[in-house]
Image (spheres, rainbow, N blue to C red):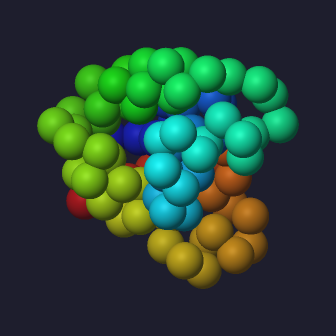
């Protein structure tokens, strides 16, 4: 499974969710203005693409794919292409 399957916006929203932001806070943290409804849509699409049933599973997949060291080096930014190691 590859996070590259996600759109840049889906990765950006997922990244913010993994950082601990609530869905209603995410639009305020992004450089592009989107609604809370759009955040929910992007997360739903990401769940479908990655086979996650819940946002908790989605974040767990993201964290597994992007270890803390990679995040600190900028490798897991919204535009990064990262493979999930199984």
Quarter occupied by residue 74:
bottom right
Please state if 63 lies on the left or on the right of 73 as rendered: left
Q: Please, which residue is most extreme toward the left here?
A: 53
Q: Nearer the viewer, residue 36 or 8?
A: 36
Q: Can the viewer see residue 82 in this picture?
A: no
Q: What residue is shown at x 31% (from left), y 60% (from top)? A: 60
Percent of width and height locating residue 39 = 51, 28
Quadrant containing the N terminus is top left
**Left or right: 61 with respect to 4?**
left
**On screen, 32 above or below 63?**
above
Q: Is residue 63 above or below residue 12?
A: below
Q: Can residue 14 be seen in the rendering of this structure?
A: yes
Q: Check the picture and name the quadrant holding the C terminus.
A: bottom left
Q: Which residue is at 36% across, 54% downward?
A: 59
Query: Residue 76 at what x, y percent from top left?
Result: 63, 57
| Residue at the (58%, 51%) spot, across then down | 16
> 14 or 80, which is in the foreground?
14
For the residue pair 64 and 1, the one nearer the viewer reads as 64
Q: x and y percent of residue 14 in the render?
A: 50, 44
Task: Tell which residue pokes out farthest to the bottom in this image.
Answer: 69
Q: Position of residue 35 (x, y in %)?
A: 61, 22
Farthest residue to the front: give it: 24
Total number of numbered labels?
Answer: 0
- What residue is rendered at 59% in x and 45% in y? 25
């Amino acid at each position: 499974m590859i996070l590259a399957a996600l759109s840049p916006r889906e990765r950006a929203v997922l990244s913010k969710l993994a950082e601990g932001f609530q869905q209603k806070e995410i639009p305020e943290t992004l450089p592009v203005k989107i609604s809370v409804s759009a955040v929910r849509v992007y997360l739903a699409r990401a769940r479908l693409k990655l086979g996650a049933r819940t946002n908790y599973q989605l974040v767990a997949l993201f964290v597994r794919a992007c270890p803390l060291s990679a995040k600190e080096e900028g490798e897991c930014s919204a535009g990064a292409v990262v493979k999930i190691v199984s």
